[in-house]
Amino acid sequence: MISAGYRAAIIQMNSGTKLQENLEEAYQYITEAASQGARVVGLPENFSFLGGLSMRMEQAPAIAEKVPSFLSETAEEYGIFLMGGSYPVPLENGKVFNRSTIYSPEGKRLASYDKIHLFDVTLNREEAYRESEYVEAGSPRPVVFRDETIGNWGLSVCYDLRFPELYRLLVSRGAEVLSVPSAFTYTTGQDHWKPLLRARAIENASYVLAPAQTGIHGDNRKTWGHAMIIDPWGQILVDAGQEPGIGYTRIDPKRIQQVRESIPSLEHRRV
């Protein structure tokens, strides 16, 4: 259990195809969040680059080289825990991992998770996605980072949100805060984003922190926005709307304990 409460911030971005500009924008948001007392700051999925597939694959080596240093140095500069959204990590087979990481206030990488559920969907005749064509699924194992300062964090990325069994495994391994950095499509976000986030919070009696992408990226990619923080009861504490920006709330260990004691569904499981 978390020893004491702390302030957390989630960042909503409109990342584009220029790596350095995206990093500079992320840095500005992190700087502001740290100045407002955030102990933990979360970035969205693909915060350092979001655009066409061919450009993303071309830039993947440069992204994978720059992003870890950026996250480490920025976390250390501001003395914060930094959840680095996600970014591509090239593999020898020509694909990439979609990796999410947490860095310590000393700039040390504390945990990393490679997205395991890949977004292969056909939404309509004009909109289809085949993430598996360029992303390699990570090892299907839950990743929980344990810390007395910020609590036990369960890591996930975007499309993972549709697979409740992953979050139940994370909570079974001690997670109290569920991290869901995302670039949810505008089409699905309208109907599914909020209900899925609230469901994951309610059924697991956990905080859910979901930094997000918003707006148009490249020529035709459109994301929903509405980065959210939801408490263990399912109450929406932060909704960032559709503009880039920062949302704040306090992560309260007493709230987790209160909800889990009042409705002990995690103890009532039979399967």
Image (cartoon, rainbow, N blue to C red):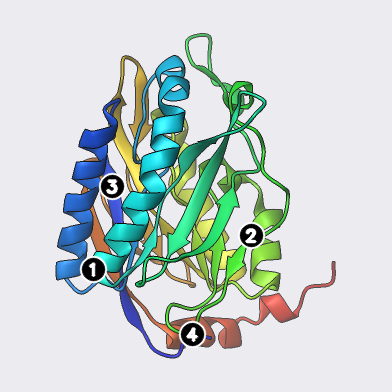
Residue type, numbered disc 1: Tyr
Query: Under tag 4, what secondary structure?
Result: loop
In the image, which is nearer the foreground, mark 1 or mark 2? 1
First along the sequence among labels 4 and 1: 1
Q: Which residue is mark 1?
A: 78
Query: Under tag 2, what secondary structure?
Result: helix
Mark-to-mark CA distance, 1 and 2: 30 Å
Q: Which mark is residue 148?
A: 4
**Residue count near mark 4 (Cα–Cα under 10 Å), binned few <14, some 14–19, many ≥20:** few
Q: Which mark is residue 12?
A: 3
The residue at 31%/14% (across/down) is 219
Q: Is residue 269 above or below residue 254?
A: above
Say which quadrant the C terminus sits in.
Answer: bottom right
Would residue 9 be seen by someone viewing this image from the given angle?
Answer: no
Do the CB atoms of the residues marked 1 and 2 lie less than 8 Å apart?
no
Among the 4 quarters of the image, the one containing residue 130:
top right
**Residue count near mark 1 (Cα–Cα under 10 Å), binned few <14, some 14–19, many ≥20:** some
First along the sequence among labels 1 and 2: 1
Mark-to-mark CA distance, 4 and 2: 20 Å
Among the 4 quarters of the image, the one containing residue 61:
top left
Do the CB atoms of the residues marked 1 and 3 lie less than 8 Å apart?
no
The residue at 62%/21% (across/down) is 133
Would residue 213 be seen by someone viewing this image from the given angle?
Answer: yes
Query: Under tag 1, what secondary structure?
Result: helix
* Residue 164 position within the rendered picture, expressed as x and y whole percent measured from the top left: 66, 54
The residue at 68%/63% (across/down) is 168
Mark-to-mark CA distance, 1 and 3: 19 Å
First along the sequence among labels 2 and 3: 3
Q: Which residue is mark 2?
A: 167
In the image, which is nearer the foreground, mark 1 or mark 3? 1
